Image (cartoon, helix red, strand yellow):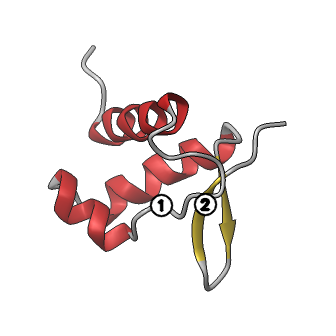
Amino acid sequence: MPKQQYQVLADELRTKIESGAWPPGTKLPSRSQLCKEYGVSDTVVGKAMMILRATGLTETLEGVGVFVAEKP
């Protein structure tokens, strides 16, 4: 069964984080920037961000943005 768009996006963003391209403390691009860059809807970006947050890779600061989490 092929992966859903949000799963593919979450995998791509996870790779950037785990490879060190986005080190801990890095602010991720905005949802609208990610939509444009990857050619997906806001819903797809939102679901991908939920996966990253649920797996502890990112932290959200309300009104500020989403950041790569510090490694435990």
Q: Secondary structure at mark 1?
A: loop
Residue 9 in picture, x, y percent from top left: 33, 41
| Residue appearing at x 40%, y 65% in the figure | 29
| Residue appearing at x 38%, y 34% in the figure | 7
Crowding near the residue tagged with mark 1, few <14, some 14–19, many ≥20 C-alpha atoms within 10 Å:
some
Quadrant housing residue 10 = top left
Residue 40 in picture, x, y percent from top left: 20, 55
Quadrant housing residue 59 = bottom right
Residue 63 in picture, x, y percent from top left: 62, 85
Amino acid at dot 2: Phe
Q: Quadrant of the N terminus?
A: top left
In the image, taking residue 2 as reference, residue 43 lies left or right, namely: right
Q: Nearer the viewer, residue 42 or 33?
A: 33
Disc sitting over residue 67 in the figure: 2
Q: Secondary structure at mark 2?
A: strand
| Residue appearing at x 28%, y 68% in the figure | 33
Number of marks in picture:
2
Residue 52 in picture, x, y percent from top left: 57, 44
| Residue located beneath label 1 in the image | 28
Q: Nearer the viewer, residue 39 or 70?
A: 70
Disc 2/disc 1 C-alpha distance (Å): 6 Å
Give the answer, above or below, for where 51 lies relative to 63. Answer: above
Q: Quadrant of the C terminus?
A: top right
Amino acid at dot 1: Leu
CB under 8 Å between discs 2 and 1: yes
Give the answer, above or below, for where 69 lies relative to 12. Answer: below
Quadrant housing residue 57 = top right
In the image, taking residue 62 as reference, residue 13 lies left or right, namely: left
Q: Nearer the viewer, residue 51 or 61?
A: 61
Earlier-in-chain disc, 2 versus 1: 1
